[in-house]
Image: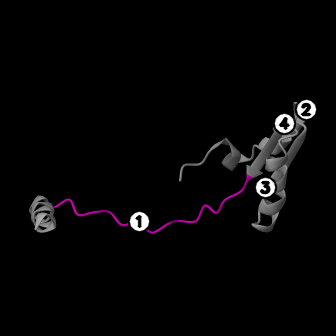
């Protein structure tokens, strides 16, 4: 979940268009993916696609770091 250059405003599809890629696009919805699939399977041009994803926070579940708990869980898994 680290911010990249695109997260700071660089529009990669426009950069690709400026250096003469045959086709560029920005995808922001799942409906746009079908057209992308068709273009990728055509394999007839140099393409660049920017796909915007949701950067929402994801709940993370970290495993316990308690050594006794880990030891006992391991022993139970062996049985």
Which comes before the other along the chain, label 3 or label 2? Answer: 2
Earlier sequence position, callout 4 versus callout 3? 3
Circle nearer the N terminus (1, 4): 4
Q: Which residue is mark 2?
A: 20
What distance separates the C-alpha of mark 1 from that of mark 3?
31 Å
Relative to 73, say whether 16 is above or below.
above
For residue 46, the mark is 4
Classify residue 72 as left or right of residue 6: left
Location of residue 1 with respect to 64 vertically, above or below: above
Q: From mark 1 to mark 4, how far is it between C-alphas?
A: 38 Å
Q: Nearer the viewer, mark 2 or mark 4?
A: 4
User: Label 1: which residue?
Assistant: 60
Most frequent secondary structure within the magenta stretch: loop
Q: Percent x, y for residue 55?
A: 60, 61
Q: Residue at x 12, y 58 (%)?
A: 67
Please tell me which residue is depicted at 53% across the width and 53% down the height of the picture: 1
Helix, strand or loop at disc 1? loop
Q: Residue at x 83, y 55 (%)?
A: 38
Which comes sooner in the sequence, label 2 or label 4? 2
Q: Secondary structure at mark 2?
A: loop
Q: Which mark is residue 35?
A: none
Q: Does residue 70 show up magenta in the picture?
A: no
3D distance between C-alphas at marks 3 and 2: 21 Å
Q: Residue at x 84, y 36 (%)?
A: 46
Residue 31 versus residue 69: which sits nearer the camera? 31
Image location (x, y in percent) of residue 52:
71, 57
Disc 3: which residue: 37
Viewer-nearest residue: 75 or 58: 75
């Amino acid at each position: 979940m680290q911010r990249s250059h695109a997260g700071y405003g660089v529009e990669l599809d426009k950069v690709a268009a400026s250096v003469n890629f045959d086709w560029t696009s920005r995808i922001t919805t799942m409906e746009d993916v079908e057209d992308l699939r068709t273009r990728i399977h055509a394999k007839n041009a140099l393409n660049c696609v920017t796909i915007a994803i949701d950067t929402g926070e994801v709940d993370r579940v970290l495993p316990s770091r308690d050594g006794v708990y880990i030891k006992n869980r391991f022993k139970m898994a062996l049985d």
